[in-house]
Amino acid sequence: MKPSLVVMGVAGCGKSSLARAVAAAEGLPMIEGDAHHSATSVAKMSQGIALTDADRAGWLDLLADLLQQHADGVVLTCSALKLAYRQRLRAAVPGLRFAWLDIGHADALARVSGRGDHFFSSSLVDSQFEALQPPNGECGVLRLDARLPPEQLQADVSAWLNTPLETRP
């Protein structure tokens, strides 16, 4: 049985691309966290209005429920910007792992600005970095440089997921 994994980071870091690649390589289902935002939250983000903790509460509860429905492992995309958000997901699924795509502000802004069909406004990149509480030192987190080639990122995550628990960082 594979552990469940959350691919996390600010907007534009590459969560969806990495999650798809890891899910395919590991034979796991994938859940796109953004697909589960409420219509109200999507409308706010489309207008350049940052979500609050209250806006995210129901979304995080739904994602936790979805994680619990996949006892044999799943890959979820979720920004998981704050420690409280990660703890909420961990409480639902013991042993939950996080692959953190670490990216600089300029790179994230360029990537978000370049995707024309996404509801997330590039004006919100600043709010993502303001909310981010980096998971440095948290158990079960793999930090990845989001600028690395996608194939390398997937290989690094797969190797980490397939390493015995007691030797994982």
Image: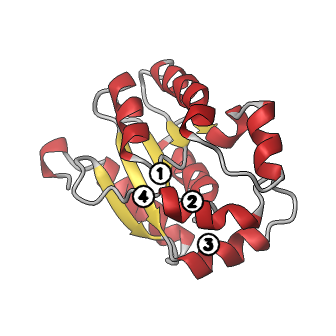
Q: Which residue is mark 3?
A: 108
Query: At label 3, which amino acid type do we have?
Result: Ala
Secondary element at tag 1: loop
Query: At label 4, which amino acid type do we have?
Result: Trp
In the rendered structure, are the residues bearing label 2 and label 1 in contact, judged by CB atoms less than 8 Å apart? yes
Secondary element at tag 3: helix
Circle nearer the N terminus (3, 2):
3
Circle nearer the N terminus (4, 1):
1
Is 117 drawn above or below residue 150 in the view shown?
above
> Nearest the camera: 136 or 7?
136
Is 45 drawn above or below residue 85 in the view shown?
below
Query: At label 2, which amino acid type do we have?
Result: Gln
Secondary element at tag 2: helix
The x, y position of residue 40, in whole percent, is 79, 33
* Alpha carbons under labels 3 and 4: distance apart: 14 Å
* Alpha carbons under labels 2 and 4: distance apart: 14 Å
Query: At label 1, which amino acid type do we have?
Result: Leu
Circle nearer the N terminus (3, 4):
4
Q: Residue at x 12, y 45 (%)?
A: 166
Q: Which residue is mark 4?
A: 100
Would residue 28 be seen by someone viewing this image from the given angle?
yes
Tell us which disc is closer to us: 2 or 4. 2
Task: Answer few, some or many: residues within 10 Å of disc 4's Cα (few below 14, many 20 plus, some between 14 and 19).
Answer: many
* Alpha carbons under labels 1 and 3: distance apart: 14 Å
Task: Answer few, some or many: residues within 10 Å of disc 1's Cα (few below 14, many 20 plus, some between 14 and 19).
Answer: many
Q: Which residue is mark 1?
A: 81
Q: Which residue is mark 2?
A: 128
